[in-house]
Amino acid sequence: MTIASATPAFCQGIQYFGKALPGFEKYGQQPAIASSQSAIASPSDPAAVFQTVLAADALRYLTLQVTASKASGHPGGFASIAEAIASLVMLGHKNIITEVGHHAPGFYSNMFLDRSLEDMGIATVEQMGERFREMHGLLGHLSGQIPGLLNPAGPLGQGQHFAMAGALLHRDVLFPVTIGDGGIGEPYVMSSIGHFHTAYPEVTNFLPILVWNGYSQEHHSMVSTKSNQEMIAYWEGNGFEEIILVNAKDYDDANQPGDYVDSTQFSWEKRLEFTQAVLEATDKAAKSAMSGKLTVLIVKQLKGAGVHKRGAQSHNLYPGDTLEKDYIVSALKTRALSPEAWELVRTNFERSAGGPASHQVVTEKELPLTDLGELPLEEFPVKGEKKVATTAMGALVAYVGQKDPNFIVSNADGNAASGINNINIALKIIHPTPDEIYFQQPKGQVYEPLSEDACAGLAASLALFGARTLWCSYESFAINGLPIWQTVTQAMAELRHPTPATITLFTAGALEQGRNGWTHQRPEIENYFAAMMRNGNIFPLFPADANSIQVCYDWALSTKNKGITITASKSPLPVRTTFEQTRQALQDGGVVLHESGGSKKVVFAVIGDMTLIPVFDAAAHLEDEGIGVRIVSVINPRRLYRPDDTAWQTCTAADSHFLDDEGFEKLFGGNALIGVTGGSSAMLEPIMLRSNSKRDTFAWKRGETAASAGHIMAFNGLTAEALAKRAVELVG
């Protein structure tokens, strides 16, 4: 193929074109990726090296122009890793993940060059600039809605979870993940990789790529003072077998000061030499990772290489940093390519990996799921023996794991402590030391790092990538894993295809943790979920008992693109509901557990299982005084919002069902309404918004050391006496 001289249509909007670079006549006449191939033939091929330089400059140019078009966004960090991204594409690797949300405009540029963005109507550079940082366009940080991109990216310390999830599910695919040297200061990255590698030593087909550019956002990174040997030792000390470091300083012939330099300032010959080193190192690292070695690629190059500024000043564009600004213009002109070079880069990127990433990467297709058949639900008799709800659910979880080999359960604090040791017995804790006492062995489906971030991270990422999972946690400690879980649920709401809901089980609530004191009593986490319910795809569930929890889990498994939290006690409690009652409650939001007549009607809207105990006692007091009582177990509070209260219309797999006014009145209409919860009163908001009765709430205040759940409830005012007294006051 001979490159045409006319300006390609996709270049519409490019501000500046340059002249052909030295060697174009020799190395730029044919794409380095042949028409029948999906990667270059050799990383040492001079034509491949030459065209990789063009690709790196194209990425830098687009990144700077698109951010400057809005005087907003982050060009500097991505610019320092452009050669490595270009190398990955030239080598045929497109399942590229990032930990760094600030690299978004660079990743969009990558997707533009390989035509992935055409799937969202972006075909020209002009259109890319118009839709950058706009609604229904290219948002400031990576999202689940951008064609060809595998993962969302916002908070630091998360991207590696997605790479490891992809590697676990697709053993024959490489998942590179760029990690900023600001992010490497977060403890989550190394700790999560360390536990994953111990649990799955054979799964090494993920490749961390450290963007070692000396700066973290607006200042020097905390690892900027490390020597090369110290950085290598750091990765070695964390279990990496192959550490490959390419240092731009080794190729600098421009006498740049400092340990971090800009390769675009080198002579043309040294630029080619540096790029060849990165291309060969990337190829070596990819092959090492795919061959069973835990491998890291480190590229040491100054932040902002090849864009408008260097160092921390290159991180962000501010108002005034427009396409007309002199240093923006100068940088764009310096990076400008000829029309022929643009066409060459586009052809290589499109051919790489067999086509646009939006048609090739693993998350663009729904992962086939094992058919579970009907879950072996066991319906216990109402008012029979007390049962442990979590144990009842554990039996179903074990069944799911035995049916579905991709299924994992993650738990930082131990399943046995949460009444679900039956999961460990059936599925086995993944551990290099076999021990029958603890039900652990090298091959298992229970993933138990001590970090909630690692627990939530792998479970949620696997769900986003299409697998069934369950993250279990003590309610008290789950907060440490919620940032990644929230990131994934937001991405699920935006995804263009269905994926299993990310499901959690939160046990050992505040009311059960009396002797442990306030360190284990943190039901304020429910504030988090109460706020997230308004997203439209978040469903906190509060089963009433061991029957109810089974139906809740069965329903959760059937849903798509949702975040579902199940909160239950690990104590033996009365069985109050039938399966059918919970099925109805999942549709209506709640179920009536008790109703009596009287001169006035007090309605108790109760969230939780253990909190039902003082409410039933209060009912007996009130009925003795001739006051009628209705007790409603609120199992699915999201159903009790009004449709306009949530953003359900914007969600993939949109769930539009809300209880209508007539149904709400049947459940909660009365002379007085009292909301009762052992957690945050915010979870009662849907009910309190709609009720026209005299009303009040009884909720968690704070923790304290106590001998029993009853003592904790008394400390928080959740007693039968207090409830009955307030009910009498409300009905006059």
Image (tube, rainbow, N blue to C red):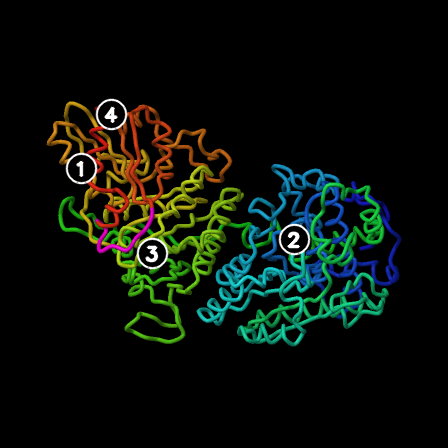
Question: Disc 3 residue type?
Answer: His
Q: Which residue is mark 1?
A: 618
Separation (CA) of disc 2 from disc 1: 57 Å
Separation (CA) of disc 1 from disc 4: 17 Å
Q: Which residue is mark 2?
A: 103
Secondary structure found at label 2: helix
Q: Nearer the viewer, mark 2 or mark 1?
A: 1
Separation (CA) of disc 3 from disc 4: 37 Å
Mark toward the start of the polypeptide (3 vs 4):
3
The reply to whether callout 3 and callout 2 are in contact (CB within 8 Å) is: no
Q: Position of residue 341 (x, y in %)?
A: 82, 53
Residue 459 lies in quadrant: bottom left
Q: Position of residue 671 (x, y in %)?
A: 24, 24
Q: Which residue is mark 3?
A: 520
| Residues drawn in magenta | 702-710
> In this rendering, does residue 451 appear at all?
yes
Secondary structure found at label 1: helix
**Which quarter of the rendering shows the N terminus?**
bottom right
Q: Nearer the viewer, mark 3 or mark 2?
A: 3
Separation (CA) of disc 1 from disc 3: 27 Å
